Image (spheres, helix red, strand yellow):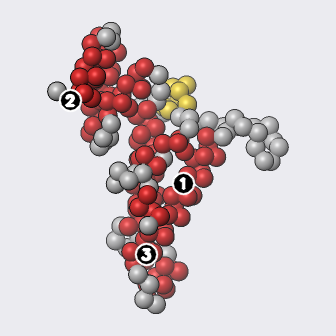
């Protein structure tokens, strides 16, 4: 048993049965989703009462769709300007890298703005917003998904925290 597993088992043994069951279920879900640090995500969800599964799914989905989706066959070709560049001899890999980097910046800016929903905004209008976890029926749980921009880089499915976008 490695240190991570020993730490997990020790922590798990100190939980009440219902929390232990919830923690094990969360870990299984995180592992099924490919989280390399599934025990840490599950532990944070239980100890800190954070909606970590919703956070993980949202951020990973943004990576796979909005950012990495540009590498899918035919994705670039759907954009007329990109098709013209390809027809003119531009390197497809470079264009994919550019599209992914721009998409990352757009996603980062969007989640950063969502994170600042309670801050004074530039419009001066006294309104705000919050991104919140919902249950299976769509009803808000009351647990906000905060600081999404902080974890966006760590959701890179390649495991490189987005560093490949700047090569």
The mark found on residue 107 in the picture is 1
Locate residue 127 relative to residue 144 in the image: left or right. Answer: right
Q: Are marks 2 and 3 in contact (CB under 8 Å)?
A: no
Residue at 49% of width from left, 70% of height from top? 98
Residue at 53% of width from left, 80% of height from top? 81
Residue 59: image x %, image y %? 45, 45
Instruction: Classify the position of the C terminus by image quarter.
Output: bottom left
Q: Badge 2 is on which residue?
A: 2
Residue 31: image x %, image y %? 27, 37
> Can residue 18 be seen?
no
Q: Count neighbours of disc 2 (C-alpha within 10 A) and say few if under 14, some if 14 to 19, many if 20 or more.
A: few
Q: Quadrant of residue 126?
A: top right
- Against 78, residue 166 (above or below) is above
Locate residue 17 relative to residue 97 in the image: left or right. Answer: left
Measured in 3D between alpha carbons, the distance from the residue under mark 2 to the one under mark 3, in whole angstroms, is 41 Å
Farthest residue in the front direction?
Answer: 3
Say which element carries label 2: loop
Q: Badge 3 is on which residue?
A: 94
Locate residue 142 relative to residue 93 in the image: left or right. Answer: right
Measured in 3D between alpha carbons, the distance from the residue under mark 1 to the one under mark 2, in whole angstroms, is 36 Å
Residue 33: image x %, image y %? 30, 42
**Is label 1 or label 2 in front?**
2
Farthest residue in the left direction?
Answer: 1
State how many labels appear.
Answer: 3
């Amino acid at each position: 048993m490695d240190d991570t597993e020993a730490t997990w088992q020790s922590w798990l043994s100190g939980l009440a049965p219902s929390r232990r069951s919830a923690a094990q279920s969360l870990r299984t879900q995180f592992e099924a989703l490919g989280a390399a640090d599934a025990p840490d995500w599950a532990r944070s969800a239980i100890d800190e009462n954070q909606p970590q599964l919703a956070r993980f799914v949202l951020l990973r989905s943004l990576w796979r769709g909005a950012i990495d989706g540009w590498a899918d066959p035919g994705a670039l070709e759907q954009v007329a300007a990109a098709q013209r560049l390809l027809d003119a001899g531009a390197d497809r890999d470079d264009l994919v890298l550019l599209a992914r980097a721009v998409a990352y910046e757009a996603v980062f800016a969007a989640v950063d703005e969502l994170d600042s929903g309670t801050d004074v905004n530039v419009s001066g209008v006294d309104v705000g917003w919050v991104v919140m976890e919902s249950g299976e029926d769509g009803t808000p749980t009351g647990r906000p998904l905060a600081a999404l921009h902080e974890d966006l880089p760590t959701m890179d499915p390649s495991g490189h925290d987005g560093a490949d976008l700047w090569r």
